[in-house]
Amino acid sequence: MGKRGASCIPGKTIGQMQLSFGMIFSIILIVVFLAFAFYGIKTFLAFQDSAKAGRFFDQIQGDIDRIWKSSQSSEQREYVVPSRADFVCFVDFLSDAKGENSIFYPELKRADYGRENLVFYPVKFTGFESKEISHMDITETTSEENPLCIKTSDGRVSLILKKDFGEALVTVTRE
């Protein structure tokens, strides 16, 4: 019978796990690839929201321009908005806050760079959080409520765009 080493305990089996350099390197590469994949997905989703915001601004401006050129019109329109936008707010920054959504006014004011009158709430994503919409009567639109915030639902918002005979600008209301 041979001598047993001091590290062996009778009745116990000691297993030793050895990871090769190749295995450790493979694990590190998998973690790096997953990190880049999540970063890419996050960047793509942010780009998607910016594209939706840009398209929304173009569509609403086009519809307001078309109604502005007519003598009289009233249309209900539905638009796709960025997924992070809970409200679409029409704001007259030259007037005081009033109405049920006046609590949003201080945060919306952060997106005012001089002439904006349309702001997404919450003001969290970058790029397209506010825009000036021309040919819109912001004073009349916000006469009872400033800001006039309209809740989005499933990434969509529904608005009524109207211009009566003899009016120079288009007003926006809730449906």
Image: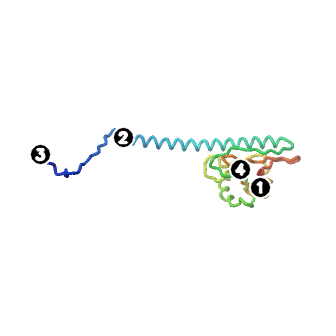
Closer to the observer: label 2 or label 3? 3
Please say if the residues under marks 4 and 3 sit with CB atoms less than 8 Å apart.
no
What kind of element bears circle 3?
Answer: loop
Point out the tag, 2 or 3, that comes first from the N-terminus.
3
In the displayed structure, would residue 2 be above or below residue 143? above
Q: Nearer the viewer, residue 88 or 61?
A: 88
Point out the tag, 1 or 4, that comes first from the N-terminus.
4
Q: Give the alpha-carbon distance from disc 1 to disc 3, as whole Å.
A: 96 Å
Q: Give the alpha-carbon distance from disc 2 to disc 3, as whole Å.
A: 40 Å
Closer to the observer: label 4 or label 2? 2
Please say if the residues under marks 1 and 2 sit with CB atoms less than 8 Å apart.
no
Q: Quadrant of residue 93?
A: bottom right
**Residue that numbered label 1 is attached to:** 142
Point out the tag, 1 or 2, that comes first from the N-terminus.
2
**Residue that numbered label 2 is attached to:** 25
Q: Residue at x 55, y 43 (%)?
A: 43
Name the mark on residue 118: 4
What kind of element bears circle 2?
Answer: helix
Q: Amino acid at mark 1?
A: Thr
Q: Nearer the viewer, residue 60 or 152?
A: 152
